[in-house]
Image: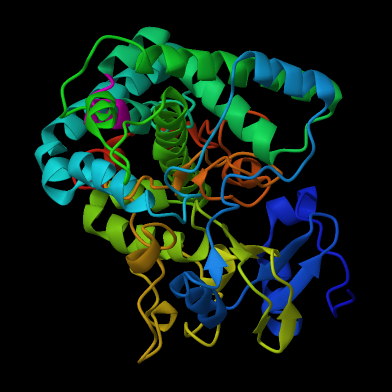
């Protein structure tokens, strides 16, 4: 199908580095665009994306965990040997069991539980910042993409879910497994790399199945809650179903928060004087962060599949068509935001970047993801599904398919990522902006 856009290569490095011109062109010339390379229908305007997310009868979440790329036979054998399976549980589940899974997660990650965890979150953040300062003192450089951007979300998530035993595997190993899973399902690895990643994902899945089969845990933990949960028919969860929830939450529950933090550190350090200004004016962090999340959210896209033939903005879409909802593009929609191209550089957000009068609530109020402040209660819901790093879309972000190459754009560690050592040693040495009020917005 031809469109005024021609072909949009979601994996092109130029697009990954600066997707804004493509997003602007899509909204203007092809707000519903079919991309033959991936088979995805790209939807990029705010009103259309919101309407699709609200119409749960026509637009289903069933494809949220689907990989787009084909696996080689050797890769499939590695996964099959590990009995790898991700049955519908959370983000990809449009059936009657979905509400029950959501209740399990709500009991563990509700507002009261998160509020009670603030001292723990502050303690973990402080410990990670102390480690960062030690590394700066010893080496003169510190990778913020690992400490604190990687370690804080992972440690907090595991403790919120009562999975402290998971720390026995080590933070480096858990992060490596998570990254490998994301790249395998949503990346574009060649045959050799694909097989290597499949081995890591298989090891991760075996380890998760070991947690499921381990000693009984209290119902105030994720393992205990899953063991006690009953499906609509009254039966318990299978090992594969419990493992799918764990796989989704461990990856998506922290990877998108890590990506958010990495991107914010990179942007803050890239603007002359802004890092020190935040240290002197910590109240400016929150509005700046809101602007960052509007323009460059860590969850850049969302997946849906059509249940029937449908017409969106005059374009006929067949039943069973996979949609890619361009969440990040909606944050710059001129029909919703005044001066939508305004950046998040100012400590106080530009008045012209706010929602226009009468505009509907931001998507995160409906989906639990998308633009807006991200906290432990959301996720990161990254969609909490495998999350943020691949170049191809699939099951990776806890149900959310993040835009290909997102990790490279944010500077996250891993394939395509960039270490976040400060370009100005003098500013990097001062970690004050991450303490006090600022660290509450992790």
Q: Which residues are magenta?
A: 156-163
Q: In the figure, is residue 397 to the left or right of 29? A: left
Specify the quadrant of the image occupied by residue 367.
Answer: bottom left
Residue 386 visible in rendering: yes
Give me the residue at 32% from left, 50% from top.
Answer: 378
Q: Is residue 162 magenta?
A: yes
Whether residue 38 is in magenta: the answer is: no
Between residue 174 and residue 54, name the one nearer to us. Answer: 54
Question: Camera-side residue: 351 or 210?
Answer: 210
Q: How is the image coloured?
A: rainbow
Q: Quadrant of residue 6?
A: bottom right
**Residue for point 66% across, 66% down:** 20
Give percent across and percent down for residue 311.
67, 84
Picture quadrant of residue 302: bottom right
Q: Residue 420: horizontal and vertical position, in percent?
A: 53, 34
- Quadrant holding the N terminus: bottom right
> Would you say 424 lies left or right of 365 here?
right
Q: Residue 174: x percent and y percent?
A: 47, 19
Q: Position of residue 143 (x, y in %)?
A: 49, 26
| Residue in the picture at 38% in, 54% down | 96
């Amino acid at each position: 199908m031809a469109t005024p856009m021609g072909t949009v290569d979601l994996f092109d490095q130029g697009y990954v580095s600066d997707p804004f011109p493509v997003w602007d062109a899509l909204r203007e010339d092809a707000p519903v665009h079919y991309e033959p390379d991936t088979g995805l229908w790209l939807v990029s305007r705010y009103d259309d994306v919101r309407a699709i997310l609200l119409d749960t009868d026509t637009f289903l979440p069933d494809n949220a965990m689907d990989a787009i790329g084909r696996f080689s036979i050797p890769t499939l054998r590695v996964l099959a040997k590990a009995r790898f399976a991700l049955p519908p549980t959370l983000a990809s589940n449009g059936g009657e069991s979905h509400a029950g899974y959501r209740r399990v997660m709500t009991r563990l990650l509700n507002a009261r539980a998160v509020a009670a965890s603030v001292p723990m979150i502050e303690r973990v953040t402080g410990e990670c910042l102390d480690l960062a300062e030690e590394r700066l003192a010893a080496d003169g450089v510190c990778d913020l993409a690992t400490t604190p951007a990687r370690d804080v979300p992972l440690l907090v998530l595991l403790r919120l879910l009562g999975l402290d035993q998971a720390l026995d595997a080590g933070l480096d190993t858990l992060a490596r497994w998570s990254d490998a899973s994301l790249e395998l399902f949503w990346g574009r690895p060649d045959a050799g790399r694909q097989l290597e990643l499949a081995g890591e994902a298989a090891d991760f899945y075996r380890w998760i199945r070991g947690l499921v089969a381990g000693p009984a845990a209290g119902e105030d933990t994720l393992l205990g809650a899953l063991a006690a949960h009953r499906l609509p028919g009254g039966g318990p969860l299978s090992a594969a179903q419990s493992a799918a929830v764990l796989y989704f939450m461990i990856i998506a529950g922290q990877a998108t928060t890590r990506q958010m933090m990495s991107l914010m550190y990179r942007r803050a350090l890239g603007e002359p004087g802004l890092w020190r200004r935040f240290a002197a004016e910590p109240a400016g962090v929150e509005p700046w962060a809101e602007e960052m999340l509007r323009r460059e959210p860590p969850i850049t896209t969302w997946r849906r599949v059509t249940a029937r033939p449908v017409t969106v903005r005059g374009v006929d879409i067949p039943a069973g068509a996979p949609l890619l909802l361009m969440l990040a593009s909606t944050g710059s929609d001129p029909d919703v935001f005044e001066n939508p191209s305004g950046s998040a550089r100012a400590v106080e957000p530009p008045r012209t970047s706010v929602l226009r009068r009468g505009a509907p609530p931001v998507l995160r109020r409906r989906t639990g993801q998308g633009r807006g402040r991200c906290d432990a209660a959301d996720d990161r819901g990254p969609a909490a599904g495998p999350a943020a790093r691949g170049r191809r879309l699939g099951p990776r972000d806890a149900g959310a398919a993040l835009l290909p190459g997102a990790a490279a754009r944010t500077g996250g560690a891993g394939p395509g990522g960039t270490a976040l050592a400060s370009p100005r040693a003098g500013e990097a040495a001062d970690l004050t902006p991450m303490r006090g009020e600022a660290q509450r917005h992790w």
